[in-house]
Each structure stands twice: as structure tokens, then as C-alpha cells.
């Protein structure tokens, strides 16, 4: 992250977060019971919310590189950054899905859920932070153990 970004970069990111949070609250997606109803095939409202978001994002990703060669606030080039489909993506996605199914909430919606008065979501947020910390410790130990034999030669 460089300091030569446009002065409106952080305020617009903040504004985008407000719009995102408002949208989650307005669409009822910040309520775990609504998400759990979707996961149990009882309410398909989440499907329409996700479809609407995918359409808007898809149009933006398709149109913006044709209009400009660089992002207006960061100056970064528009380019595709593909992550390979590997074991980490599969295992991480499965763990995320289990957590989503157990709690009925994903990270973005969890923060929005606080805004609509769901204080008990703090338990899920604490679990997310603990899980992310545990993964970070695991990853750093795995990286250190992979590097140790190479340095011993």
C-alpha cells in the first residue's frame, strides 16, 4: 500500500462499506435466521440478493477495463488475478461453508448484523477472529518448518 493514492480513496472505501452494510441490513441478509432459512431451502431471497450483486459486479468488471486502463483512485492497472484451484482453496472453502452453515452468517453480514442490533453475533465474530488467528499460526509454523530443512544445507 502506497501513500500516493488519491485523497478520496479511504473516504470512498468507507462510503462503500456503509452502502454494503445498509444493503445487507435492508435485504435482511444481516439476520442469521434468514440465511439459515436459505440454507435449508425455505427462503430463496438470499439467492436474489447474491444474483443482483453478481450482475452489478460482473458489469463493472467487464466495462471498467474498456473505459479506463487504470483504477481512478489507486492508479493500479485493471487485470485478472486468478488464484489456482488447489487443496487450500478447497479445504478453506469447505471450512468457511461449515462455519457459515453453523452460524448462519458470513463475515460481512456479521458486522452488518451488529448494526441491526444483533449483539449475540459477537460470539460468531470472536470465533471468526480466533479461527483466522489459528490459521495464521498454523500457516506460519508450516512455512517455518518448510524453510528450515532448506536452510540446513
Image (tube, rainbow, N blue to C red):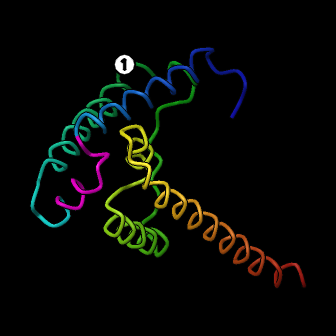
Q: Identify which residue is drawn at 68% across, 35% down.
A: 1
User: Looking at the image, which is closer to me, 38 or 67?
Assistant: 38
Whether 32 is among the magenta residues is: yes
Location of residue 71 with respect to 62 vertically, above or below:
above
- In the picture of the structure, the residue carrying the numbered disc 1 is 67
Q: Position of residue 53 (x, y in %)?
A: 26, 38
Does residue 127 belong to the magenta stretch? no
Q: Where are the magenta residues, as a range?
A: 28-37
Q: Is residue 151 above or below residue 17?
A: below
Image x and y of residue 92, in percent? 46, 69
Q: Residue at x 47, y 32 (%)?
A: 78
Instruction: Using the rendered view, name the quadrant where residue 54 is placed.
Output: top left
User: Mark 1 packing: few (<14 Cα in 10 Å), some, or many (20+)?
Assistant: few
Residue 2 placement (x, y as % from top left): 71, 30
The residue at 55%/20% (across/down) is 11
Asked whether, in this view, residue 66 is left or right of residue 128, the answer is left
Taken as a whole, is the magenta stretch helix, strand or loop?
helix
**Quadrant housing residue 16:** top left
> Foreground: 153 or 99?
99
- Label 1 sits on a secondary structure element that is helix
Q: Position of residue 58 (x, y in %)?
A: 27, 37
State which quarter of the image contains the C terminus: bottom right
Q: Is residue 84 left or right of residue 116?
A: right
Amino acid at each position: 500500500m502506497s501513500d500516493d493514492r488519491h485523497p478520496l480513496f479511504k473516504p470512498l472505501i468507507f462510503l462503500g462499506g456503509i452502502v454494503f452494510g445498509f444493503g445487507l441490513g435492508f435485504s435482511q441478509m444481516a439476520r442469521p435466521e434468514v440465511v439459515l432459512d436459505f440454507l435449508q431451502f425455505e427462503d430463496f431471497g438470499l439467492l436474489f440478493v447474491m444474483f443482483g450483486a453478481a450482475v452489478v459486479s460482473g458489469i463493472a468488471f467487464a466495462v471498467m477495463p474498456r473505459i479506463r486502463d487504470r483504477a481512478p483512485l489507486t492508479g493500479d492497472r485493471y487485470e485478472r488475478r486468478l488464484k489456482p484451484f488447489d487443496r487450500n482453496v478447497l479445504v478453506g472453502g469447505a471450512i468457511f461453508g461449515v462455519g457459515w452453515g453453523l452460524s448462519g452468517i458470513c463475515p460481512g453480514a456479521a458486522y452488518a448484523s451488529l448494526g441491526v442490533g444483533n449483539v449475540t453475533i459477537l460470539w460468531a465474530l470472536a470465533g471468526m477472529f480466533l479461527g483466522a488467528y489459528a490459521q495464521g499460526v498454523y500457516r506460519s509454523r508450516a512455512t517455518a518448518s518448510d524453510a528450515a530443512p532448506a536452510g540446513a544445507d
